Image (tube, coloured by chain):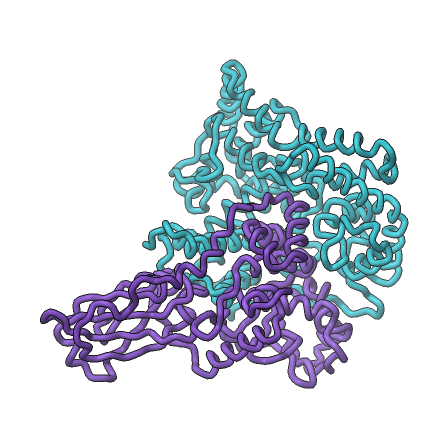
Amino acid sequence: MSILPRPDRLVLGDAAVPVPPHLAAVVEARGALLVWRIDRDEALPDALIHDSAAALQWLPEIYGAGIADALASGDTHAARPAAPGAAAERTRLLAHLAWCTAWWPAGLAVPRLPAELLAAETAVLTAELEYLLDAPDAPDRALDAARGALVATGAADGALAAALRNLLEDYGIEPDESAAAGAAQADWALAAGGAGAGGGLTAATGTAEVAWAGVPAQTVAADGLATWSLVQRDGATVLRVAVPATGPGARPVARFGPDGLVVPLSFDGLAYTGETAATPGLLRLRTADRTLRVHDPRMTAEAPDPEPAAERAAVLAFAGARLAHPWTSAERSAAGGRP
Amino acid sequence: MAPEPATPAAPPRAPGRAARSAVIARVWQEFGTSVAPLSNGAGRPSARSSKLILDPLVIRPMQNPDLAGGFLAPEQAEALADRLRAAEAVLAATAAWFLALKRARKALGITDGNPQDLYFQRCFELGTIHGPPAGDAEEIAEDAVLDVHRSAGESILARVRSLLGDAAAADRVQRALDAAWAARSPSGGTVDAARVRAVLDAAAAGAPDDGVDALAAALAGTASADTLESDGAARTLGLSARDRIGAPAVGGAAAKRDLPRPFDRSIFERLFADLSSGSNREVYAEAEDLVDDEVARSAGPWQLAHEECRVLMLLGAELAGGLAPRPPAGASAAQLRLRERWEREAYVRRALRLPGETSGVPAEIRADIEDVHRNYLRRLWVRLHGREIRDRGAEAVAVWDVLDGVLRSVIMDQRHRLKRALTDERAESA
């Protein structure tokens, strides 16, 4: 049973096409999974209902008062409410925070979002919306995850920090006020060396996209391209790979060519880089066989296909729009403003 | 033809039926800022306010069953609203006392436990007895906080520990344990598998009378425990690492991490697991009684004392069979409904950008996920054991909430471990 908003009505039905993960902003509500698509500016989510009785306790607050009748009567094309319910905007914000935490396309064009601010705002909003969330201990878990965020939040958004502090107190969770670990982002930019060090003659080179789903959040630059080079040096051929980074924390592995020659990569401050002795046949590979796939084996067993270009573009456009018109404290901070 | 997963249908429509939570929220709004300390950011009573104050102390669904449903007819909705309004003064007083107790807690430098869990009911008492805090409020608040922490779980555990540390007492406990275990014998009862399935399907469909009480009356839980005696049976269910279950040790020390499987835990470890979790309500028991009860409990069927809990283990074992990597042929409606959460999790994990199941996270986490049905039963047993210790047998248990809630806890913990696996720099991938 699902509720799918359309421009002029709510369609009630059974099937729902799963929204691709990188486009999905989700909230696990009681009795239903709510999914907003970030590439559509739609105030109402798709609702995948698995327990109507439980969901009906709060569905009207998202879809308006008429939804209960619509579900009961099986009227598959219920009229849209004049305006979304009171909780729709706040719930959408919670979903948006989940999406930012997972898929924010930090990279060459888009700055990172401060993780502490995301955690703080998620915790406060989770506590506010606890009455419609699936897990009874959702606020406790979210607050626990935000224990270390007070210091950084206080510096950026006093009101948010105060709200977080009160909640931590009420839930009996002790804040961790040691100096924030994430503050040293700027230090990574002071990198020594880069992908090009080492000299030699580049015999061949190429690029490849890296699937977002194969690497952890905010590690590999979302809008960057991995590059490979076959370099001849001192009579030997070396395969060098570099993947632009936006933060440490990934442990990517590159595989090149039809035989999947493995190049383990490590973070050098600007990129994940590595090189390995090239097998003799590599130079003779046809262009079509010079494939590079990069993924973090902790995320997936095999490197997934990169997300479709149009969807990536939509995500990057959405991030740009959020930096221009922030919805969250983290976005405001990344965009350089004060809340 | 595979059965459809049982899902609770939308309740029958009758004009004017209101969602219970909406009724409560509406009245709560009328109270204004006086109840703010008991509210969440959305201006509604917080989850703990509902669970610890409104339901058991004001609404009392056990004594007023027509106020218990999720959807209320107009007269019931009004009755509920009236009950709440009648309690407005005491709720406002409760809220004020909560602020006072929090101040006292801070002044005393106490930081452990969850203030809402620890103080809410005490504040309601104070509000009922004294009304709103007045001149001597600070003193009363301080006394209340000290009293709560004195009788809280931590000190009970300390008393148990010192009891078991005394050689003579430990000896007596050992002898009681030997006697209880020597007296065990199979019940010889039978379990009607079709009836169990029917009960599960009814519970999954949200039927008000699912037949669980009847199963308890028929001692089905006790009967089902006979199978645990065969070699490897308890291990298959994740309740023991041994081939045959045997009497537990008395014990006297425990560590939070790496507690053994439930049936392999010592008497002390069983108590430790529940009493050290900190956030729970006061346990009214003497250390000796607690230990004696635990000894007797360990020798019971499913190593539990209450038949309702044993029936829940029986139901859980039946359900857990559906949590295999692929849905088993002939899965029941209830098993399919439970699986829905498991299958939903696969998508949610991808949406949250967490490692996929076949990924290279540390082998123990992967095994954890593949072993979900064993984890589930272990978790269920621990939860039921905790309920028995806190003597909440009288509390109405919504069977499906318990069975589904345990899977949710298992899933949330797996997510947490997966997240940690990504951020823990020292973790080695398999």
Q: Looking at the image, which is closer to me, A278 or A296?
A: A278
Q: Residue at x 64, y 43 (%)?
A: A172
Q: Can I make out residue A299 in this image?
A: yes
Left or right, B326 with respect to B15, comes to: left
Q: Position of residue A167 (x, y in %)?
A: 66, 50
Q: Chain drawn purple, letter? A: A
**Residue B406 against residue A272 in the figure, above or below:** above
Q: Position of residue B373 (x, y in %)?
A: 47, 52
Q: Nearer the viewer, residue B41 or B58?
A: B41
Tell me where residue B52 appears, x and y as whole percent: 73, 45
- Is residue B28 positioned above or below B258 on the image? below
Is residue A49 visible to the viewer in this orientation of the structure?
Answer: no
In the displayed orientation, state which residue is furthest to the left: A235
A301 left or right of B83? Answer: left
Placement of A243 over or under B221, stated as above or below: below
Q: Residue at x 50, y 67 (%)?
A: B351
Quadrant of the rendered structure where residue A247 is?
bottom left
Residue that appears at 64% across and 65% down: A339
> Chain B is shown in which shade?
cyan
Q: Is residue B215 left or right of residue A194?
A: right
Image position, residue B240 (x, y; %):
43, 40
